Amino acid sequence: MRPYLPIVMSFFLSLSSCVKAQQYAENESDKPIRVNYYHEINLVSDNLKSDPSNVDLLNERAILYLRVKEYEKSLQDIDKAIGINSGKSDLYYTKALILMQRERYDKSMEVINKAIEIDSKREDYYFFRARLYSMQEDYREAIHDIDAILSLNPRCEYCFLQKAIWCKKLNMFYEEIRNYLYYLKLSKDEKNKVLVERRLKTIRKSDKYFNDLYKAAKKDIRKNGYPWEYEIWNQN
């Protein structure tokens, strides 16, 4: 029998350049802070009156409009910004976020691909695209984007957690186990670690086959070390 227990997790997708990891347990420090977005919109709008071609201000207001679900105004601002500076990758990222919120996933994919074409070193762009792939249940492509992040940041702990979750979706249980073990080595999030350890315990107890997979993964790590220790990461 193959273990496939539901795991409770929450996903936070940043509207800024900072990537928020998919987590099993929400931290107390992640409690939302109340913000008067319309007040912020008015402040940015006042600044735009004296500098109407400022793409950073247009981008900022587009994000604020997105926060209050005024999608058309948000798109108008970001399209204007792109028209002024079509080479700024952040603008395409914002537009991809807006389109995703409108459930225009194919168009959002097209736009985030443009952002990655402009700047292929941004972890948040790959993570965003990975989430789009996962929403279409294309977990293999999603994992490829996680691997792209790991090539940039081999110690990306949330990447190993997310990769394990998607490997589980594909019934790739050996890879699921290995990535959980990598995550446990790096992570300091005790809440998530408890749940990951619980999942591994469930796998080991399910039957001999899965217990052998666990042992094989542990043996592999003892023999070869962890991915961030591989020489491949140091090659330029």
Image: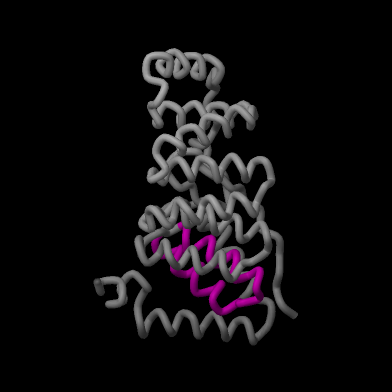
Q: Is residue 46 above or below residue 223?
A: above
Count of labels in the image: 0
Which residue lies at the image location 47% right of the left edge and 17% below the top edge? Answer: 45
Asked whether, in this view, residue 18 is left or right of residue 33, the answer is left
In the image, residue 156 above or below residue 38:
below
Is residue 66 within the magenta segment? no
Please identify the dominant SS of the magenta region: helix
- Name the image quarter holding the C terminus: bottom left
Percent position of residue 40, x then y: 49, 18
* Residue 162 drawn at (x, y percent): 54, 61
Q: Position of residue 2 (x, y in %)?
A: 71, 77
Residue at position x 52%, y 36% from top?
79
Residue for point 56% across, 54% down: 110
Q: Is residue 204 left or right of residue 161?
A: right
Residue at image position (66%, 76%) is 171
Quadrant position of residue 136: bottom right
On-image quarter of the N terminus? bottom right
Would residue 120 appear left or right of 13 to someone viewing this image? left
Residue placed furthest toward the front: 83
Front position in the image: 48 or 198: 48
How far across and down, in percent of the image, does residue 204 sit? Answer: 61, 76
Q: Which residues are magenta?
A: 158-186
